[in-house]
Image: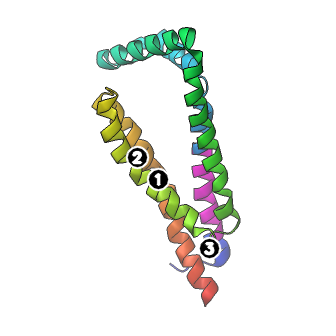
Amino acid sequence: MNLTQTQLKKRIKYWLILLITGLVLSGITAFPIESELTIAMDNLDVFSPRMQHWLTTIYAAVKTTNAQYPYLSYGTDWLAFAHIVIAIAFIGPLRNPVRNIWVLQFGMIACVLIFPLAFIAGPIRHIPLSWQLVDCSFGVIGIIPLYMAYRYTGKLEQLERA
């Protein structure tokens, strides 16, 4: 199927807006971790017994840490901020995908690098395998819109050269 430049740009925009939205939401939800865990604790019965144990453990750790060492949560604030800043980086490809294709490549590399981080740091930090897989799912989910935008950008570049 041959798409026009306008159609390709719309598809690229769609996939990038989806990615940017996901990054911003991921960032915003990293700020209120204790509040989110409180909601999970109020609804523990919807989780499996294994997940209930994990959430209870995490909630106790976060609550204790925030009460005794609130400055450690500053690290997750920076994590949240980084998600938002990374989302901003994708405005370049949103405006001019061909010129900024390297940002899409960077994003796909970052998605792939989630796997070694999760599988190396996870066991060191005593993160259950099931949660490491949840973390890896962000790489899988993130690479989909990036790859689609990258593929359409390649086609757009070919059309612009012709």
Q: Is residue 28 left or right of residue 134?
A: right
Residue appearing at x 57%, y 72% in the figure = 153
Q: In the rendering, at what x and y percent does residue 27 appear?
A: 60, 37
Separation (CA) of disc 1 from disc 3: 20 Å
Question: In terms of sequence position, does the residue under pointer 2 or pointer 3 come before the other?
Answer: 3
- The answer to if 12 sits in the magenta stretch is yes
- Farthest bottom residue in view: 162
Q: Residues within 10 Å of mark 1 (few under 14, many from 20)?
A: some
**Residues at marks 2 and 3 touching, judged by CB atoms closer than 8 Å:** no
Based on the displayed image, in which of its 4 quarters is residue 97 positioned? bottom right
Give the residue number, with chain letter if any, for mark 3: 98
Q: Is residue 56 left or right of residue 6?
A: left
Q: Vertical placement of 145 versus 72: above or below?
A: below
Give the residue number, with chain letter if any, for mark 2: 114
Q: Is label 1 in a helix, a strand or a loop?
A: helix
Of tags 2 and 3, the one toward the viewer is: 2
Given the image, on which type of amino acid does mark 1 rest? Ala
Separation (CA) of disc 2 from disc 3: 26 Å
Given the image, on which type of amino acid does mark 2 rest? Ile
- The C terminus sits in image quarter: bottom right
Give the residue number, with chain letter if any, for mark 1: 110
Given the image, on which type of amino acid does mark 3 rest? Val
Looking at the image, which is closer to me, 7 or 34?
34
The count of marks equals 3
Q: Residues within 10 Å of mark 3 (few under 14, many from 20)?
A: many
Question: In terms of sequence position, does the residue under pointer 1 or pointer 3 come before the other?
Answer: 3
Q: Is label 3 in a helix, a strand or a loop?
A: loop
Separation (CA) of disc 2 from disc 1: 7 Å
Residue 43 shows in the view: no
Q: Vertical placement of 117 versus 109: above or below?
A: above
Predominant secondary structure, magenta span? helix
Q: Which residues are magenta?
A: 9-22
